[in-house]
Image: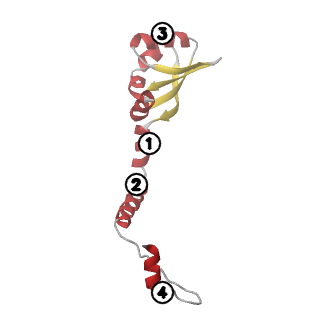
Amino acid sequence: MLKRLVAYVLGHLRIAVVGERVERFLNLAVAQGLLLWNIERLPDRLRASITIEDFRRLRPVARGSGCRVRILRRYGLPFRLARLRRRPVLLLGAAACAAFLLWATGHIWLVQVKITGPEALDPRAVAAGAA
């Protein structure tokens, strides 16, 4: 659970490695100390997950093995925050909604009890029955 949380906070990528020597790619990546997980071997490619920091160090490994690396999907908090930075009105609306809810919870809303019907109840009888 902690590993998944760290991977989400730091961000990670799902990549596809295409080439003739994907096994050489894996050996070079391990030799460089790169962390790959969820590795899948398909007939024509290899899929794996890698951290953002390790992805930046992946270029020499790809060149050395003659493979091409393609990003399939981006996961994690850095990518979510990047999307939110491009949508400032959404952030402003969420902040305004949170501020309104905070303000509204600090106030007592009006509570009014009206008795309607053929006969009105005696307030003393209601008070005596509640006690």
Q: Position of residue 82 (x, y in %)?
A: 41, 43
Q: Amino acid at mark 1?
A: Arg
Q: Residues within 10 Å of mark 2 (few under 14, many from 20)?
A: few
Viewport quadrant of the N terminus? top left
Q: Which residue is mark 4?
A: 122
Q: Quadrant of residue 95?
A: bottom left
The reply to whether the C-beta atoms of the residues labelled 2 and 4 are less than 8 Å apart is no
Q: Secondary structure at mark 3?
A: helix
Q: Which residue is mark 3?
A: 27
3D distance between C-alphas at marks 3 and 2: 44 Å
Q: Which residue is mark 1?
A: 80
The reply to whether the C-beta atoms of the residues labelled 2 and 1 are less than 8 Å apart is no
Q: Residue at x 40, y 43 (%)?
A: 81
Q: Secondary structure at mark 2?
A: helix
Q: Which residue is mark 2?
A: 91
Q: Residue at x 39, y 21 (%)?
A: 57
Query: Mark 3 or 4, which is nearer the eye?
Result: 4
Q: Position of residue 83 (x, y in %)?
A: 44, 45
Q: Amino acid at mark 3?
A: Asn
Residues 121 and 91: in front is 121
Q: Earlier in the sequence, mark 3 or mark 4?
A: 3
The reply to whether the C-beta atoms of the residues labelled 3 and 2 are less than 8 Å apart is no
Q: Residue at x 50, y 25 (%)?
A: 49
3D distance between C-alphas at marks 1 and 3: 32 Å
User: Up-down: is 92 above or below 80?
Assistant: below
Q: Earlier in the sequence, mark 1 or mark 4?
A: 1
Q: Amino acid at mark 2?
A: Leu
User: Up-down: is 93 above or below 38?
Assistant: below
The reply to whether the C-beta atoms of the residues labelled 1 and 4 are less than 8 Å apart is no
Q: Secondary structure at mark 1?
A: helix
Q: Is residue 62 visible?
A: yes
